[in-house]
Image (cartoon, helix red, strand yellow):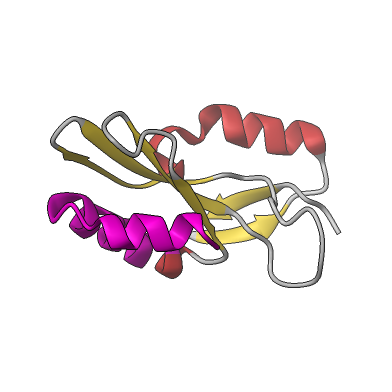
Amino acid sequence: MSNKYILIGQQPVPEADVIAWARWFENAGDQRTVCRTTVGDADVSTVFLALDHRFSGDGPPILWETMIFGGRYDGWQARHTSREEAEGYHHKIVEALRTDDKVFFRAKEEV
């Protein structure tokens, strides 16, 4: 199976043709963005990756990523297997930043 995916609506669909995938990726623009939120000096971004990031083991493809740019937790990221999970996690991270929940970030670093 292909490790490349495109979105049809909000549904990820495998795309075996690398040229078709590259064209979709080049033109997808904001379609790949799930959420973007600024909290203080940090930007939280959740996007559709379009490439499966499950590099080993079994399970659903890992196709979404939430990442923090700037601030105390710059570079912190989490990856997800569904858009719903990605959206929910985005909001959890935003809330943890707003409340400066050091326990949340420390617990995730230990995983």
- In percent of width and height, residue 62 lies at 63, 58
Residue in the image at 32% along x and 62% along y: 104
Q: Main secondary structure of the magenta part?
A: helix
Q: Position of residue 76 (x, y in %)?
A: 43, 42
Question: Left or right: 73 with respect to 66?
Answer: left
Does residue 103 appear in this view? yes
Outermost residue, right side: 1
Magenta range is 86-111
The verdict on residue 62 being magenta is no
Please identify the quarter of the rendering in which residue 101 is found: bottom left
Q: Quarter of the image containing the N terminus?
A: bottom right
Q: In the displayed structure, does residue 6 sit left or right of residue 28? A: right
Q: x%, y% of residue 39? A: 16, 41
Residue 9 visible, this orientation: no
Quadrant in the picture for the C terminus: bottom right
The total of numbered circles placed on residues is 0
Q: Nearer the viewer, residue 46 or 67?
A: 67
In which image quadrant can residue 22 be found?
top right
Q: Residue at x 46, y 43 (%)?
A: 32
Left or right of 73 on screen, residue 100: left
In which quadrant of the rendered view does residue 73 lie?
top left
Q: Which residue shows up at 13% across the image and 35% down it? A: 40
